[in-house]
Amino acid sequence: MNWLRRQDMSSDSPSSDIEGISLCPIHLNLLENLDSSVKMIFSNISESGFSIWIVGGAVRDSLANITVNDIDLATDATPSQLMEIFPSSIPTGVNFGTITIPSDGKFGDIQITTLRKDGSYLDRRRPESVRFGTSLLEDLNRRDFKINAMAIDPINLQFYDPHCGRDDLDSGILSAVGEPFERLDEDGLRILRAYRFMCHDSGPFKPDENLGKALVDSVGNLGSISRERIWMEFSKILTYSNVYNVLQKMVEDGVMDFIILGCNDIPSVDDCYIEGISRYDLMIARLSLLLKSVEEENVEEILNQLLVPNKVRNSVISIRGRIGITPNPESKGCLRRYRMELSDDLFSQLSAERGFSAQISDELRTALSVLPPLVGGLEPLISGNEIISRLGIEPSPLLGQLKQWLFRIQVENDLPDSNSIWEKVESLGFKGQPLGEYRMWV
């Protein structure tokens, strides 16, 4: 007997204060394919006399037939009661009703939040007070958008949708739960979340008239949001397949001024999408391309203000500076140096180049795809000590330049050992100084 059948036979009457309907095949399939660790959480909470619901993105994304990447749970058990049921749980946000259960399953650690009703949001970020409760309706009423205000009862196999979020999902409409101005005033970051859902994989969505007006009129609320939170939300926007229209709308609505001041013309960012590219590489490419239109002296300041991680900052500055500077696809030597210099940023660079010129980028990707690995490996075959010994020079800036130049020769000519490199440079007329550019790629 499968897990769903066991739940159906042992369930009592539905525990919600909302009228539900039987789960559709899509949600039944979602439940059947959950990790055993998640099913164990359902069973333990139910057997302890409490109710449990799946809420948020998993409910929405399964209906949209896209991959469910995480799962959020809500319960009428208090945090202290949950920690008694799960002794290994971590009180990650206990003041707001959230505990985390460590898990090595598909979804990683699982967060469970007690049903609650929020007080006033005086700082446009967090409620000043939280009241734990037992009302699923009150909990769903505090959600931002109707598509995120649906719930599944995995024990009684019921679906709850008091705000008709599935209708919005089916029609591609994004509307707020309740009064949109109030929702956006509670947490200004919901403004950026709205634009993110406009290009979300479960959509795309178009804001209804009331939400659309509220987004424009409430844009100033972004001024009170921390730069870290703005960056986290904006970076997610850049990861979806088609974002050009949304970014253009952000410019028109005045939202972009709070993110990349001076970015008024959106380039062909949708062309950056390459089959198989990771969301991270796509985000780096698009941010680099967006900053291409910004004055160079302002780029570092914008990245610093956004508080992007150093790894992102360094990649973006490097990629932005190289956009439009591509090797001749017919020159294997140039292709080798280009590939070596870009290293982990290669896919992001090619993605950014595609937004700049799709034809050039596609030709370059084709040429690189058939380029064999280097026979000499990815590290310099000639060390600084070997250069000092052979040429009789002292450690100096010249030594560093020579080492870089010799590595460039090694890569460009795909040489297998140090003897081959010395033979090559001597054939070029080497007299102790680099001949031409010593860097791998500009």
Image: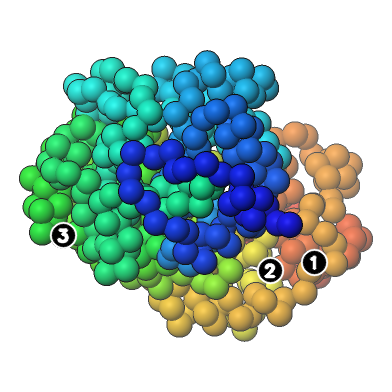
Q: Earlier in the sequence, mark 3 or mark 2?
A: 3
Give how far apart the Cα atoms at labels 2 and 1 are.
Answer: 8 Å
Q: Earlier in the sequence, mark 1 or mark 3?
A: 3
Which secondary structure, mark 3? loop
Give how far apart the Cα atoms at labels 3 and 2 are.
Answer: 51 Å
* Residue under numbered circle 2: 336
Task: Decide: is 297 above or below 279.
Answer: above
Task: Decide: is 369 above or below 402.
Answer: below
Question: Residue 109, position in %: x, y?
Answer: 61, 36
Q: Nearer the viewer, mark 1 or mark 3?
A: 3
Q: Quadrant of residue 147?
A: bottom left
Disc assigned to residue 374: 1
Write the residue at 48% across / 25% down: 77
Question: Residue 138, position in %: x, y?
Answer: 29, 34
Which corner quadrant holds the N terminus?
bottom right
**Mark 1 and mark 2 in contact (Cβ < 8 Å)?**
yes
Q: Amino acid at mark 3?
A: Asp
Which secondary structure, mark 1? loop
Q: Quadrant of residue 286?
A: bottom left
Give how far apart the Cα atoms at labels 1 and 3 are.
Answer: 55 Å
* Residue under numbered circle 3: 208
Q: Is residue 128 visible?
A: yes
Q: Amino acid at mark 1?
A: Leu
